[in-house]
Image: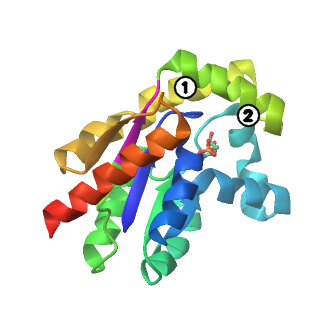
Amino acid sequence: MRLLMVAPPGAGKGTQAARLASHYGMAHLSSGELLREEVAAGSEIGRDVAAYLERGDLVPDEVVIEILTKPVLDAVEHGGYVLDGFPRTLRQAEEAHRVAKQVEGIELQAVVHLAVGHDEVRRRLLARARREGRSDDTGTTIAHRLEVFDAQTRPLLAYYAGRGLVVDIDGEQPVEKVFADIVDALDSLRAGRR
Ligand code: AMP
């Protein structure tokens, strides 16, 4: 299966993507995680993007496209992918769609939108900060990342809805229930397409 998770920071997209990946046997590709690995490794890309991550700004489209293209192409050979955090701008989505149209069997099949209100994501991100100490989980950076999500990523939902791909899930429920709702929605989608 080939999926994209769209949700504000802290809505649980990483958690749900990991579970979906093992449930359906596909690769979990997290753009944020791949970028943090570049920063930790001190690579050239890592040095270029570190300040963006620290501020909670999006890194330039070209960088994420470069980092994600090969893992996506590899994943389609091995059970598919769940994309967690990419595409995150309309430009990235249009570029990914342009490439996908040229290669058979790599295009997205569904976009899972986890709806979680700002108050709840703020609460979860502050809890994650205490638990994991991620450097972009601080009060001001969290507020900025939510603004970035609303301005640059939320418009993807209308774009993908126009292509009939969006599955809306109430992400404020307990983790198990969110997972069960996603699996139900995806399984009915697949049954409907058979
Ligand atoms: P995440 O782990 O998804 O919360 O992403 C952490 C950070 O990585 C974001 O705040 C951005 O700085 C960067 N990032 C992740 N994915 C993308 C993307 N698709 N485009 C631009 N920046 C990204």
Of the pair 180 and 120, the residue shown nearer to us: 180
Q: Give x and y (percent) for residue 7.
A: 46, 38
Which colouring convention does the figure follow? rainbow
- Secondary structure beneath dot 1 equals helix
Of the pair 95 and 20, the residue shown nearer to us: 20
How many numbered callouts?
Answer: 2
Q: Residues within 10 Å of mark 1 (few under 14, many from 20)?
A: some
Q: Is 19 drawn above or below residue 8 in the view shown?
A: below
Instruction: State the image quarter where residue 139 is shown.
Output: top right
Res 115 visible? yes
The residue type indicated by label 1 comes to: Leu
The residue type indicated by label 2 comes to: Asp
- The tag on residue 146 is 1
Q: Is residue 189 left or right of residue 31?
A: left
Q: Is residue 109 left or right of residue 8?
A: left
Q: Is residue 100 left or right of residue 19?
A: left
- Residue at point 53%, 33% (across, down): 174
Res 42 visible? no
Query: Regarding ligand 1, which quadrant of the image does it lie in?
Result: top right
Q: Quadrant of the C terminus?
A: bottom left
- The tag on residue 25 is none
- The tag on residue 136 is 2
Q: Give x and y (percent) for residue 180.
A: 42, 47
Dominant SS of magenta comes to strand
- Residue at point 70%, 19% (across, down): 140
Disc 1 residue: CB within 8 Å of ligand 1 = no
Q: Give x and y (percent) for residue 33.
A: 67, 55
User: Which residues fall within the magenta stretch?
Assistant: 112-116
